[in-house]
Structures are given as C-alpha cells and as structure tokens.
Image (cartoon, helix red, strand yellow):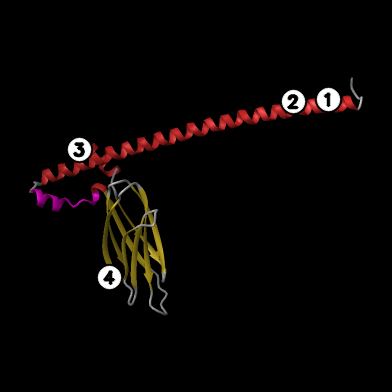
Amino acid sequence: MMKCVAIVALLFSSACAISFYVPANDRKCLKEEIHKNIVVTGEYEFSEGIGFTGSIHVTDTRGHTLYKRENFNDLKGKFAFTADEYDVFEICLSNHAPQGRHEKREVSLTMKHGVEAKNYDDIAKAEKLKPLEVELRRLEDLAESIVKDFAFMRQREEEMRNTNESTNSRVLYLSVFSMLCLLGLAAWQVIFLRNYFKSKKLID
C-alpha cells in the first residue's frame, strides 16, 4: 500500500527545477499553468557576475504583477504568491550587464506549488505534531490535491467533449445547408438552360 502511495506521490509531484542562460541585457520568460487557490513558491540563483544585477517579474495573463524585484545584486532569492484563479503565469528573469560587458549568466529556477510548497516543519511546530502525524498530514494534503486534480481534469474533459459535440453539430448543419444550396443551384441551372434552349428552339 505504501509503495502505491509513493508511486502516486511521485506522479503528482509539483516541484520542478530548470537551469538556463540569460544573455546580457536580455531576459527569458517561463510560463506555468496553476490551478485556483494554489500556493506557489520559487527559488532562483544567478551565476557570479561582477557588476551584474538581476530582475524577476511574475505576472498573470491579465498583466497583474504578482511578484517583482528589480536590479538586485544578490545571487539568490525566493518568491511566493497564491493563484486567485486558474491561469497561466509568466516568470521573467532579466540579466542587467554593466557597460562594456556582454557575458551571459546561468540562472537556476526551482518552483514548487500545492503540497510541495507547504512548510510542514512550521506546521509541526505550530500544532505540536509528531513526525508520523506530520507525514500523515502531508499524505492527506497530497490525496486531497490529487482528488482536486482529477476533478479538474474531468471538468476539462467534459468541457472539451461539449465543445466537440457543438462543433460537430455546427459542421453537420453547415454540410446540410451547403448540400441544399448546391442542389438548389443545380436545379436552377437545369431550369435556366431548358428555358434558354426552348427560347432558341433548340429543343421542344
């Protein structure tokens, strides 16, 4: 049983880490799809660069700023925000180079959301929980998160199915209408040509 729980926990892990290079005086952005009421935490780290500064900017699709820090000299930092609704969030990291310098810098970004973003050490201290109770709380939260994910996927599947059915119905109606138009045009051509040939006395 515990093996199955471990496998499910790995499949639904909400932590991701990535490293990439940002050119001098440029920025790179990543997009992350987050569900409603989900806490997101992140850690970033820039490689060494004398005189270089960095910036980070987190926005949603409506252009609202959820986190912003500009022209900092620190190599490491953290950020956190809560998604008010289901949306795609953009995390942009910039590399500001001093005049005459053109080196690119490596940036490491680690993001956690949902259960992975919770600090269970603080929860244990606040509620005076034993290690086993903390682990059970974490598994309970993970199970709840998985149920919500399945419910969300089911809702999305229903929406996509309804969209497909609506599209199929519209295509069917359009096909029938097009066929009727073609039949009407063909009948009109036959009648027109028949009357024309009759007027020219080519047929009786």
The alpha-carbon separation of the residues under discs 1 and 2 comes to 11 Å
- The reply to whether the C-beta atoms of the residues labelled 3 and 2 are less than 8 Å apart is no
In front: 41, or 36?
A: 36
Coordinates of residue 186 in the picture (x, y in percent) = 74, 28
Indicate the secondary structure of the residue bearing disc 1.
helix
Q: Which residue is mark 1?
A: 194
> In the rendered structure, which disc, 3 or 2, sits on the residue that comes first in sequence?
3
Residue depth check, mark 3 versus mark 2: number of the one nearer the observer: 2
Of discs 4 and 3, which sits in the foreground? 4
**What residue does disc 4 label?**
74
Q: Find residue 64 and name its label.
A: none
Three-letter code, disc 2: Ala
Residue found at x 41% / y 71%: 25
Three-letter amino acid code of the residue under disc 4: Asp
* Position of residue 143 in the picture relative to residue 23 (left or right): left
In what quadrant of the picture does the N terminus appear?
top left
Task: Using the image, determine if residue 81 lies above or below residue 187.
Answer: below
Q: Which span of residues is magenta-colored?
A: 116-127
